[in-house]
Image: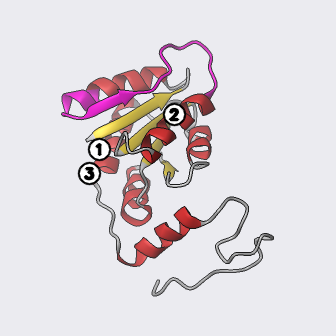
Amino acid sequence: MRLAIGSDHAGFALKEHLKTWLAARGHDVLDLGTDSESRCDYPDFGFLVAQAIVRGEAERGILICGTGLGMAITANRLTGVRAASCTMEYAAEMARRHNDANVLTMGARLVTRELAERLVDVFLSTPFEGGRHEERVRKMDRVPRGVSPAGRKDGTGGCLPVGPA
C-alpha cells in the first residue's frame, strides 16, 4: 500500500521507526517530513500528508506529533480527509470500520513504538464496513465548513435521518 507519513519534531523518532517498519512489510512509504528533531510546526506536515491523500498520491496517511491531536485537527481541515487520533487498537479498528478513516494520527508522547506498530497494523488491515456507515461518511465529505449537516449555519438544525442505526 502507498502511505504518506509525516511528523513534527516531537514525532520524528517514531516516524523514522515506522518508516523502516512499514517498508519491511512491503509498503511504499512517502515521507513528507520533518527531517530532524529541530523544532517545527506540525500544521506544515499535517497539510502535506492530507494533501497527498486528497490528490490520490497515497491511499492512507500517518501523522505523528506530541499528542496526535494537532495533526488530526490540521488534516481534517481538508475535505475528503478523515483523520482519527488513536491511542488504542479498538479506536483504530472502529475509525476504519465505521468512519473509513484514511489518516491515522498518533502522539509520540502517548504511545510506545510497540503500540504504534499495533495501531498502524490494525489501521491498515481493517476494511471499511460500508452499509449503514456509507451515507454518514458521504455526509461528512460534502458538508462545507461552517454549516451543520442539517444545512443551518447556526448549527442548531439537529440531525438529518440517515437510516437504521
User: Residue at 61% of width from left, 66% of height from top?
Assistant: 143
Residue 164: image location, x then y, percent: 45, 87
Residue 34: image location, x then y, percent: 50, 20
**Labels 1 & 3 near each other (Cβ < 8 A):** yes
Question: Is residue 26 shown left or right of residue 87?
Answer: left
Does any portion of residue 155 appear in the rendered image? yes
Q: Quadrant of residue 13?
A: top left
| Amino acid type, mark 1 | Asp
Q: Which residue is mark 3?
A: 125
Give the image's coloring scheme.
Answer: secondary structure
- The majority secondary structure of the magenta stretch comes to loop
Q: Is residue 46 magenta?
A: no
Question: Which badge, 3 or 2, is on the more N-terminal residue?
Answer: 2
Q: Which residue is mark 1?
A: 121
- The one nearer the camera, 87 or 36, is 36
Question: Is residue 61 shown left or right of residue 68?
Answer: left
**Labels 2 & 1 near each other (Cβ < 8 A):** no
Does any portion of residue 18 appear in the rendered image? no
Give residue 3's mark. none
Secondary structure under badge 2?
A: helix
Question: Is residue 88 shown left or right of residue 25?
Answer: right
User: Which residues are drawn in magenta?
Assistant: 21-41
Q: Disc 3 and disc 2: Cα gap in Å?
A: 24 Å
| Amino acid type, mark 3 | Ser
Question: Which badge, 2 or 1, is on the more N-terminal residue?
Answer: 2
- Dot 2, crowdedness within 10 Å: few (<14), some or many (≥20)? some
Give residue 48's mark. 2
- The one nearer the camera, 155 or 20, is 155
Locate the N terminus by quadrant. top left
| Amino acid type, mark 2 | Leu
